[in-house]
Amino acid sequence: MLGIRYVKVEPTDFVMQHSRGKLIREGAGLSFLCFAPVTSIVLVPMGSVDIPFIFEEVTADFQQVTVQGQLTYRVTDPVKLSSLMNFSLTPDGKGYSSDDPAKLSQRLINHAQVLTRGSLKSLSLREALGESDGLVTSLQEGLLTSKAITSLGIEVMEVSILAIRPTPETSRALEAEAREQILLEADEAIYLRRNAAVEQERLIKENELNTEIAIEHKKRQIKETQMETEKSVQRKTREIREDEMAAKIALEQKNKELVLLSTANAREEADASAYAISVSMKAFSKTDPVILQALTSAGMKPGQLVALAFKELAENSEKIGQLNISPDLLRELLDQDISS
């Protein structure tokens, strides 16, 4: 009303009020009343801004690639920026009076593209596809040290490369080559695995043969040990038998000596007995037979004496006319024999 307008800006915006060619006030997040017909408002955003970019470049081996990324910046010196670019608002305050604010983002993108082109000129396609981190570093350093950007009062906070892609034809060729390389590596892996399996099989066979050889060697040692043991046992047995035979021979020799000695003793005893008998016979030969008979009958039992008497009677039977023997005498003799 009556050209008076209320202005209120966010804390992340820097505002400057000019009236009749003079700077009235400036600052971030201000709010004030102004007379619109003679007031010019400059509004510079100071918050961080993300700018996506995508452009095509050529590598050192003349291969076209598409670089996609994003950079983040913020205004550090809004007064300097407003002095170089027009950030004035329209009289109604609903927009900028020029397209300079939109050109700022494109100017940063163009500068990033120039730096990217300079980096890709020294890289081949394969190197460029794997050098996103190196490209980010070179872009960030280039943007931070660029006079064209620092003179605007702008600070580049972050640069990121989202993708570096070749053309579809080149991508298919690379994929085919990579696929063939992968298949080749797979074949080599299969070959190595089979070779390792064969080697392991060979080692297993060798171990089995070595085990069999060791077993046979042990069996031979056991057999030799058993034979040596049997031989030792046989030798000990033979020695025992020889000792037994020697003992038996010695015993038989002792028995032979004993028999010879016994025979000699018996012979000597017989000779002594014969000599005693001969001496006795010589003595008896000179003795009266009646005396000898009397001596013989001494100590005989009655039955024996009766039998001796009957014998003498039988010897002189031709001289006896008649002999009567009572039954009582025979009964008594029989009773004595039975009782004895």
Image (cartoon, rainbow, N blue to C red):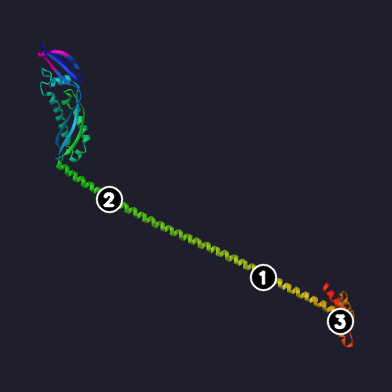
The reply to whether residue 340 is in sight is no
Which residue, as the protein is rendered here, is positioned at the far top?
2
Amino acid type, residue under disc 1 in the picture: Glu
Mark 1 lies on residue: 252
Left or right for 142, reference 225: left
Which residue, as the protein is rendered here, is positioned at the far front?
327
- Which quadrant of the figure has residue 66? top left
Between 67 and 114, the one lying in front of the other is 67
Between 6 and 268, the one lying in front of the other is 6
Number of callouts? 3
Amino acid type, residue under disc 3 in the picture: Phe
Assign a secondary structure to mark 1: helix
Q: Are marks 2 and 3 in contact (CB under 8 Å)?
A: no
Between 15 and 333, the one lying in front of the other is 333
Q: Is residue 37 magenta?
A: yes
In the image, the segment drawn in magenta is 32-41
Assign a secondary structure to mark 2: helix
Amino acid type, residue under disc 2 in the picture: Ile
Q: Nearer the viewer, mark 1 or mark 3?
A: 3
> How far apart are labels 1 and 2 at the CA level?
90 Å
The x and y percentages for residue 75 are: 19, 23
Judge whether 291 appears above or below 125 on screen. below
Image quadrant where one finds the C terminus: bottom right
The reply to whether residue 197 is in sight is yes
Question: In the drawing, what numbered circle is on residue 190?
Answer: 2
Q: Residue at x 27, y 49 (%)?
A: 189
Image quadrant where one finds the N terminus: top left
Mark 3 lies on residue: 310
The x and y percentages for residue 328 are: 87, 78
> How far apart are labels 2 and 3 at the CA level?
139 Å
Q: Of marks 2 and 3, which one's residue comes earlier in the chain?
A: 2
